[in-house]
Image: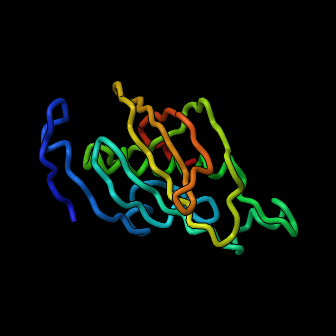
């Protein structure tokens, strides 16, 4: 359900500050092109369009990467935590642009200051808090903080660019 948010001093107009309570897996797959085994989100919640979102990834022992990372000591690879941040941001961009995002895709451009605080293991629920820092034209910059049970497990600043989808080969 989309809900308007009352603007505060210095905030964007109400039309830009709409909220979305829940984006389910079907809508995520409509918004971004990722699919199993590389889809790193199960849902997105607490979306404030053009501002922030929280991606949720339920980490299961059945994830294919656990077979090799690491046998008998499964740990979610840090790069996949960063990927879940990027996918959350991609959903936020597409939902913010609405119809203007049709035929376009969000590409990861850069990452800065990535820090990993503690391992993410099977049974954890990864909550990825993404906040838009700014956007200029097609380039968007974000701050991401991943948490498990309210404890920070990873953080990074990263940029993405929205571009026309490449023609099929």
Closer to the camera, 102 or 65? 65
Left/right of residue 155 with respect to residue 29 in the rendered view: right
Q: How many marks can you see?
A: 0
State the residue at coordinates (53%, 34%).
157
State the residue at coordinates (63%, 36%).
114
Q: Quadrant of the N terminus?
A: bottom left
Residue 115 position (above or below residue 92): above
Left/right of residue 9 with respect to residue 44 in the rendered view: left
User: Which quadrant holds residue 73?
Assistant: bottom right
Residue located farthest toward the right when viewing the structure as drawn: 72
Closer to the camera, 4 or 138? 4
Residue located farthest toward the top when viewing the structure as drawn: 136
Q: Position of residue 121 (x, y in %)?
A: 70, 64
State the residue at coordinates (73%, 67%).
64
Residue 96 position (above or below residue 126): above
Q: Position of residue 4 (x, y in %)?
A: 14, 53
């Amino acid at each position: 359900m989309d809900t308007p948010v009352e603007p505060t001093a210095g905030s964007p107009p109400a039309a830009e500050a709409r909220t979305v309570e829940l984006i389910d897996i079907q809508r995520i797959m409509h918004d971004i092109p990722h699919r199993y085994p590389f889809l790193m989100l199960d849902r997105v919640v607490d979306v404030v369009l053009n501002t922030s979102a929280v991606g949720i990834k339920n980490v299961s022992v059945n994830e294919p990467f656990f077979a090799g990372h690491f046998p008998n000591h499964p740990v979610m690879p840090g790069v996949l935590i960063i990927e879940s941040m990027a996918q959350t941001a991609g959903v936020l961009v597409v939902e913010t642009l609405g119809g203007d995002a049709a035929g376009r895709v969000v590409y990861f451009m850069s990452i800065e200051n990535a820090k990993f605080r503690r391992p993410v293991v099977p049974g954890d629920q990864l909550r990825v808090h993404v906040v838009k820092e700014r956007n200029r034209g097609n380039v968007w910059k974000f701050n991401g903080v991943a948490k498990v049970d309210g404890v920070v497990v990873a953080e990074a600043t990263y940029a993405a660019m929205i571009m026309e989808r490449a023609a099929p080969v």
